[in-house]
Image: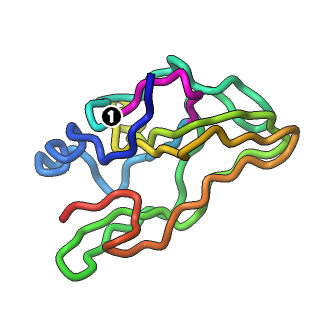
Amino acid sequence: MAITAAVCNSFKTEALQGIHLAADVYKIALYTSAATLSKATTAYSATNEVGDSGTYAAGGQTLVGYTAALDTDTAYLDWSTDPAWTSATITARGALLYNATRSNKAVAVLDFGSDITSTNGTFTVTFPAAAAATALVRIT
């Protein structure tokens, strides 16, 4: 099992087909180290998702503040609010960004690099700066 950070290949094709829209609902779900997520992931699955705890529930959280922009020759997506779950006991290795409006189609996989744990506290995923070299979802 492995989690490998990537923009999902299916998303790249679907973006060109006009499937993913700014008005859609995008979500983030957290996964344990037992999950297998990569550029080949095509849709959200509850398999090896972290368990419900505190304000975390299956399917994760809706992302807020969608922005699509162009920086030099790189297009990117960003969300203005870092997702956080309170009063949560969670151990997660990675996450999946997905489009809940479009049959839970996968957008991108995040690999935290190691297990991250919160114990009856706040689990936050801090998104990097929205720019060509750092945004989570980039198309060059």
Q: Residue furthest top?
A: 47
Q: Is residue 128 above or below residue 87?
A: below
Q: Is residue 103 above or below residue 140?
A: above
Which residue sits at x=46%, y=39%? Answer: 96
Q: Which residue is mark 1?
A: 105
41 horizontally vs 125: left or right: left
Find numbered disc 1 in the image and state the secondary structure of the residue it sits on: strand
Q: Quadrant for residue 9, please give it.
A: top left
Q: Residue furthest bottom?
A: 72
Residue type highlighted by circle 1: Lys
For label 1, the crowd category at 10 Å Cα-Cα, with few meaning under 14, some 14 to 19 and many 20 or more, is: many
Which residue sits at x=80%, y=34%? Answer: 89
Query: What secondary structure is the stretch in magenta mostly built from?
Result: loop
Q: Residue 99: where, in percent of width, then height?
A: 38, 41
Which residue sits at x=73%, y=34%? Answer: 90
7 horizontally vs 47: left or right: left
**Region in magenta:** 30-38
